[in-house]
Amino acid sequence: MTQDEIIEMAMQAEFVSHGKPSDEESELFVCVDKDIYKFAKLVADKEREACAKLCEEYFERVMASRIRARGQALFQ
């Protein structure tokens, strides 16, 4: 994942950006517990989908379907 993708997921998880605290290149993000869980789900979903795509490309589609189904079962 790229830094931009991670920041985008943090915003989707409702982390609050407070801009750059100094001249450094990083931003300051603040969140609460529920935001961390949302963020973890977004990251897991993205990683799971990457694994499923590799399986489709190199192995068999049944395995990819099982990987995707596991994510649906975990976060319902």
Image: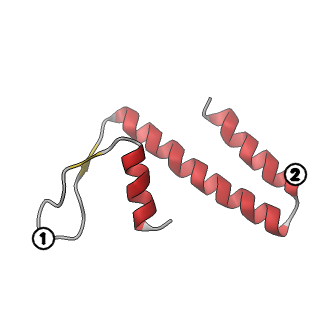
> How far from the left and from the top, in percent, is residue 16?
27, 44
Which mark sits nearer the N-terminus, 1 or 2?
A: 1
Q: Which residue occupies the extreme top position in the image?
A: 76
Q: Residue shown at 66%/54% (left/top)?
A: 49
Q: Residue shown at 80%/46% (left/top)?
A: 66
Q: Secondary structure at mark 1?
A: loop
On the image, which quarter does residue 26 sit in?
bottom left
**What separation in Å lies between label 1 and label 2 (alpha carbons)?**
50 Å
Task: Give the answer, above or below, for where 63 lies relative to 3.
Answer: above
Task: Give the answer, above or below, for where 24 lies relative to 48.
Answer: below
Query: Dividing the image into 4 quarters, which one contains the C terminus?
Result: top right
Determine whether label 1 and label 2 are within 8 Å by CB.
no
Q: Which mark is residue 52?
A: none
The residue that label 2 is drawn on is 62
Q: Residue shown at 65%/53% (left/top)?
A: 48
In-image side of 13 versus 27 (left or right): right
In-image side of 69 versus 59 (left or right): left
Q: Amino acid at mark 1?
A: Asp
Q: Secondary structure at mark 2?
A: helix
> How far from the left and from the top, in percent, is residue 19?
19, 56
Label tally: 2
Q: Amino acid at mark 2?
A: Val
The residue that label 1 is drawn on is 23
In-image side of 36 versus 76 (left or right): left
> How did the renderer colour the structure?
secondary structure
Mark 1, other Cα within 10 Å: few <14 / some 14–19 / many ≥20: few
Q: Residue shown at 59%/48% (left/top)?
A: 45
> How far from the left and from the top, in percent, is residue 9?
44, 51
Mark 2, other Cα within 10 Å: few <14 / some 14–19 / many ≥20: few
